[in-house]
Image (spheres, helix red, strand yellow):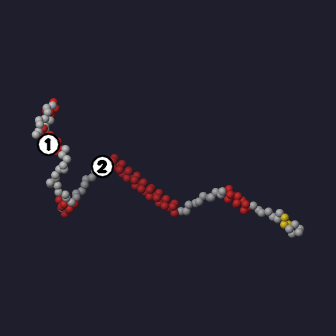
């Protein structure tokens, strides 16, 4: 049975009756799943059949488009011009990079190590000539 609500100072502002409050509280905290008898699963065919318009009788009218102030139109034109220029410069830079990639790179002259320098010097040093005696023997 429903017991009458306790009267407080704020009870005059409560417009629901105590019975409605109790039913609402029961529904909110019920643990069993709610039964949905009227639920019917649909698929794409059903949706198209119900909501698709007749394509023969449908045509799209023109659109008005936004109303653009002259100052805004000038700014947009300037921005478009800048974008076009950027694209051109980007393309030119790409082409220049491709051309440079095809050329062989110049190699910097290799610096010789101390050992290699010594070997080069030794190749150019004249060998000593041998003196011959009257007897035909060689002396160092």
Q: CA distance from mark 2 to mark 1?
A: 58 Å
User: Which residue is farthest left?
Assistant: 1
Which residue is at 81% across, 64% downward? Answer: 129
- Residue 106 % position (x, y): 58, 60
Crowding at dot 1, Cα within 10 Å, few <14 / some 14-19 / many 20+, comes out as few
Q: Residue at x 22, y 57 (%)?
A: 61
Q: Nearer the viewer, mark 2 or mark 1?
A: 1
Residue 13 position by quadrant: top left
- Kind of element beneath mark 1: helix
Which residue shows up at 17% across the image and 42% down it? 25
Image position, residue 74 (x, y; %): 35, 49
Quarter in which the C terminus is drawn: bottom right
Vertical side of 110 occupied by 33: above or below: above
- x, y percent for residue 139: 84, 64
User: Does dot 2 land on a helix, a strand or a loop?
Assistant: loop
Q: Is residue 48 visible?
A: no
- Tell me the tag on residue 49: none
Q: Is residue 42 left or right of residue 79?
A: left
Identify which residue is drawn at 36% across, 48% down. 75
| Count of marks, rendered view | 2
Q: Is residue 77 above or below residue 132?
A: above
Disc 2: CA contacts within 10 A as few (<14), some (14-19) or many (>=20)? few
Which residue is identified by label 1?
23
Whether tag 2 and tag 1 are in contact, CB under 8 A, the answer is: no
Of 37 and 76, which appears nearest the observer? 37
Q: Residue furthest right?
A: 134
- For marks 2 and 1, the one nearer the N-term is 1
Q: Residue furthest top?
A: 9
Q: Which mark is residue 68?
A: 2
Q: Is residue 82 visible?
A: yes
């Amino acid at each position: 049975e429903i017991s009458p609500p306790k009267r407080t100072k704020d009870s005059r502002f409560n417009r629901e009756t105590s019975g409605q409050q109790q039913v609402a509280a029961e529904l909110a905290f019920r643990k069993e799943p709610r039964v949905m008898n009227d639920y019917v699963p649909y698929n794409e065919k059903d949706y198209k059949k119900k909501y698709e318009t007749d394509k023969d009788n449908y045509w799209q009218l023109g659109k008005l488009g936004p109303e653009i102030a002259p100052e805004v139109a000038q700014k947009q034109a300037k921005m478009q011009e800048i974008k076009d220029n950027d694209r051109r410069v980007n393309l030119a830079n790409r082409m220049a990079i491709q051309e440079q990639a095809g050329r062989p790179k110049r190699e910097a002259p290799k610096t010789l190590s101390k050992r290699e320098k010594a070997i080069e010097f030794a190749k150019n040093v004249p060998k000593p000539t041998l003196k011959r005696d009257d007897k035909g023997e060689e002396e160092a």
